[in-house]
Image (cartoon, rainbow, N blue to C red):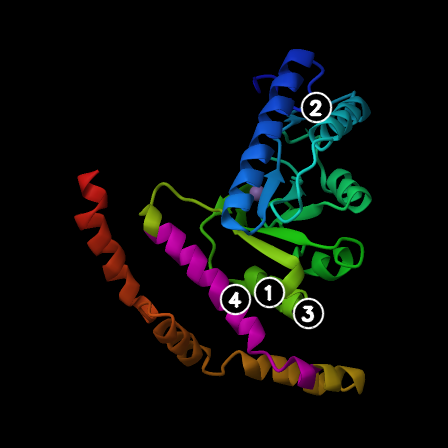
């Protein structure tokens, strides 16, 4: 049903109808889960629609996508059960020349309809800063979903690591005092390594980046900035990098009753031997 490269923006009514129904059901399931958990589920809509080569009917496919979204979201669910997010993409394998659900398309949609906007950290140009989008978007959009991911060239979803991009993202969210308005979706994978290990590496990296941002003496940095003392601002930002962050992280792990530093590797191996290998 996606063989043509188009789903919700397909000009084949049978294909489009299938995906509209599919997503309506997915939202119902998500709302049911939210109700059971007494905590809202976030249903995130992403489609692969696009084309490998020059596409003439760019407007028409986007028009069809818009009509599909109107139909899908005509069904409303209580916001305490379900929140809707929409996710764009820049390009991918097989959709190098045209992606129907682009950043501009979904940004406009989310701003107009009050839905969450999802930013996938691997769905932008490799030199584009996703962190810098936070403070711009949150002026126009109430809540956001971040698909915490690691892009490598045109591919997303590599195992998340504690890198500059993730730190910058968390710093921007903390500095914007927006932790209550941003959700984090940990969705990444690499089937070539231990999957539990992949999951834990990414989850720990995300928490490390958040902790790193929370430890920043933002008020002092802001004082320097407001005073025009850009030398002191840069000097302090540099000095922060060699503060004993690892000791705070280890203490956090101890309080959370999980292994500090690299001791969790053995726990993953142990689980692999005792549980996974018997499946
Ligand atoms: Mn994504």
Foreground residue among 124 and 43? 43
Instruction: Please check the rendered image and state whether residue 212 is part of the magenta-colored stretch, yes or no.
Output: yes
How far across and how far down the image is residue 273, in percent?
A: 18, 49
Task: Report the Cα–Cα distance between label 3 and label 2.
Answer: 37 Å
CB contact under 8 Å: marks 4 and 2: no
Q: Which badge, 3 or 2, is on the more N-terminal residue?
A: 2
Task: Report the Cα–Cα distance between label 4 and label 1.
Answer: 6 Å
Determine crowd level at label 3: few under 14, some 14-19, many 20+ residues with C-alpha closer than 10 A: few
Instruction: Write down the residue under mark 3.
Output: 177
Instruction: Write down the residue under mark 2.
Output: 9
Question: Chief secondary structure of the magenta span?
Answer: helix
Task: Report the Cα–Cα distance between label 3 and label 1.
Answer: 11 Å
Q: How many marks?
A: 4
Question: Mark number for residue 122?
Answer: none
How far across and how far down the image is residue 135, in percent?
A: 74, 62
CB contact under 8 Å: marks 4 and 1: yes
Q: Is residue 69 left or right of residue 266?
A: right
Please identify, in this view, whether the residue under mark 4 or under mark 3 is nearer the observer. 3
Question: Mark number for residue 170?
Answer: 1
Where disc 2 sits, the SS reads: loop
Instruction: Write down the residue under mark 4.
Output: 209
Q: Which badge, 1 or 2, is on the more N-terminal residue?
A: 2
Give above or below for 32 relative to 119.
above
**Region rendered in magenta:** 197-221
Where disc 4 sits, the SS reads: helix
Q: Quadrant of residue 66?
A: top right
How far across and how far down the image is residue 253, in percent?
A: 37, 71
Give above or below for 72 relative to 272.
above
Q: Which badge, 4 or 2, is on the more N-terminal residue?
A: 2
């Amino acid at each position: 049903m996606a063989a043509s490269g188009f789903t919700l923006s397909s000009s084949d009514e049978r294909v489009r109808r299938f995906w509209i129904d599919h997503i309506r059901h997915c939202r119902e399931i998500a709302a049911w889960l939210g109700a059971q958990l007494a905590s809202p589920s976030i249903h995130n809509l992403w489609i692969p629609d696009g084309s490998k080569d020059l596409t003439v009917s760019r407007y028409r496919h986007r028009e069809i996508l818009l009509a599909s979204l109107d139909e899908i979201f005509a069904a409303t669910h209580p916001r305490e059960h379900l929140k809707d997010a929409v996710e764009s993409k820049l390009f991918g394998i097989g959709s190098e020349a045209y992606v129907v659900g682009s950043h501009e398309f979904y940004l406009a949609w989310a701003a107009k309809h009050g839905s969450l906007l999802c930013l996938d950290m691997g769905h932008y140009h490799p030199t584009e800063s996703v962190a810098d989008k936070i403070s711009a978007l949150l002026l126009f959009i109430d809540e956001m979903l971040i698909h915490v991911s690691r892009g490598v060239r045109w591919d997303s979803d590599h195992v998340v690591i504690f890198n500059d991009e993730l730190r910058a993202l968390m710093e921007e969210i903390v500095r914007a005092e927006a932790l209550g308005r941003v959700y984090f979706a940990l969705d990444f994978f690499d089937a070539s390594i231990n999957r539990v290990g992949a999951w834990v590496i990414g989850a720990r990296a995300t928490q490390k980046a958040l902790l790193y941002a929370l430890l920043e003496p933002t008020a002092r940095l802001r004082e320097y900035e407001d005073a025009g003392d850009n030398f002191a601002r840069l000097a302090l930002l540099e000095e922060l990098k060699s503060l004993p962050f690892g000791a705070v992280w280890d203490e956090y792990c101890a309080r959370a009753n999980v292994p500090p530093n690299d001791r969790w590797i053995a726990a993953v191996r142990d689980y692999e031997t005792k549980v996974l290998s018997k499946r």
